Amino acid sequence: MDGPVTKESSANSAAQKGVPDEFTVSGTEWFRTNNFTALPEILVNPLALYGYGDVNLVPALYVLQYITPDLLTAFIGQRNVYYADFHAIWGNFTEKKLCSTEIRTNHEIRCIDRSGENPVVKYTYPHGNFYKWGHQTCSKLIMALPPLVANLERAGLDLTEEENNVFKDVVVHNYFSSAVELELPFGVSYIASSENATVPPPSDGQPVAVLHLSAESNVSVSWSWGPDYPPYYLSEAAAEETLIETFGRINKDPRNLTAQSEPFCRSDVKEFRKWDYFPHFNSQPLKDGAYKKLNELQGCSKTYWASGLGGMETVEWSIRAGQDVVDSYF
């Protein structure tokens, strides 16, 4: 395998040194060790409801990146939140920053061959009632997807043993999002209950939150959280059925104590998707130097790795992780 190409930066140097042991423990353990005794309970819902798991299990390395002062004060009601149209944001960004870059949509990558001088990507795209094949020779590859081994194999990547040894330890959360037409007034929300204030709602596939965010639409957004590991892994179809059953019991104005729930059926679900959400390493791989090993892969076979795994999978941190790859190696 080709050796990595490096250009030093402070972030890169930190990655090469590995993750300090104190950040490999759970968020709850780190907070208690450092006498932030109230934070574990405050952060239970901000992590779990938005797909980032159980603060009692997720390593502090990620929790501390996620909980910024503005986000924390918003969750405890000390400041207002603001809503953004992400489609409009990215549309504006591409017009200003990527006007000369061709973005190919509806293409499926079938093979990534790195055996020659330059990587070659083979793909298919819709053509009439079938599809056509195309290919592109690349000077370098930047992989910006959640690097689960299954995802890399699906893309036809000629995975190396070193890459497999790193990415076999990547885990994601079984997380679902939906857009539903629900009898929920604007500004009203549901939050799933939990056993007590120290643990999140159970990861049994039930919706954990539903919010009506726009007064101009009768569509609400909802998120569901299922078990993360086999044999308890929840399929997308099963999670959608659970959502329909649950909303059939609460499809009413919760402010009216005598209101009866309106029928809720599949046609009321406007969109339902499962995501490979929050790629990360658990505590033991972090202790074993997972990020040092990931850093050593950068540039090998002219391939670079930039995804939410490079930081904390929020939009801001994913962008920073991509910028760090560019600043460090290009």
Image (tube, rainbow, N blue to C red):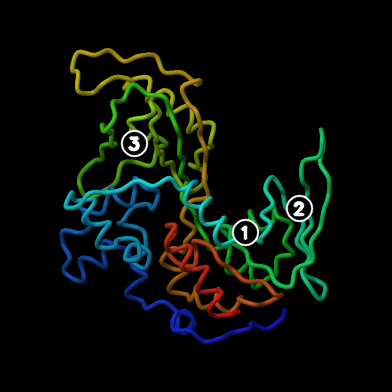
Residue drawn where x is 44% and y is 24% of the image? 244
Which label's residue is closer to the chain start, 3 or 1?
Answer: 1
Element marked by disc 1: loop
Quadrant where the C terminus is found in the figure? bottom right
Element marked by disc 3: loop
Q: Position of residue 309 (x, y in %)?
A: 50, 64
Q: Is residue 155 above or below residue 218?
A: below
Which label's residue is closer to the chain start, 2 or 1?
Answer: 1
Q: Position of residue 166 (x, y in %)?
A: 57, 69
What's under tag 3, amino acid-wise?
Answer: Leu
| Front residue of 105 and 157 | 105
- Disc sitting over residue 110 in the figure: 2
Q: Position of residue 318 (x, y in %)?
A: 47, 62
Residue 125 lies in quadrant:
top right
Q: CA distance from mark 3 to mark 2?
A: 38 Å
- Disc sitting over residue 99 in the figure: 1
Q: Position of residue 320 (x, y in %)?
A: 46, 68
Q: Is residue 132 above or below residue 317?
A: above
Q: Is residue 88 above or below residue 102?
A: above
What's under tag 2, amino acid-wise?
Answer: Arg
Dot 1: few (<14), some (14–19), or many (≥20) neighbours within 10 Å? Answer: few
- Mark 3 — residue? 213
What's under tag 1, amino acid-wise?
Answer: Cys
Dot 3: few (<14), some (14–19), or many (≥20) neighbours within 10 Å? Answer: some
Residue 145 lies in quadrant:
bottom right
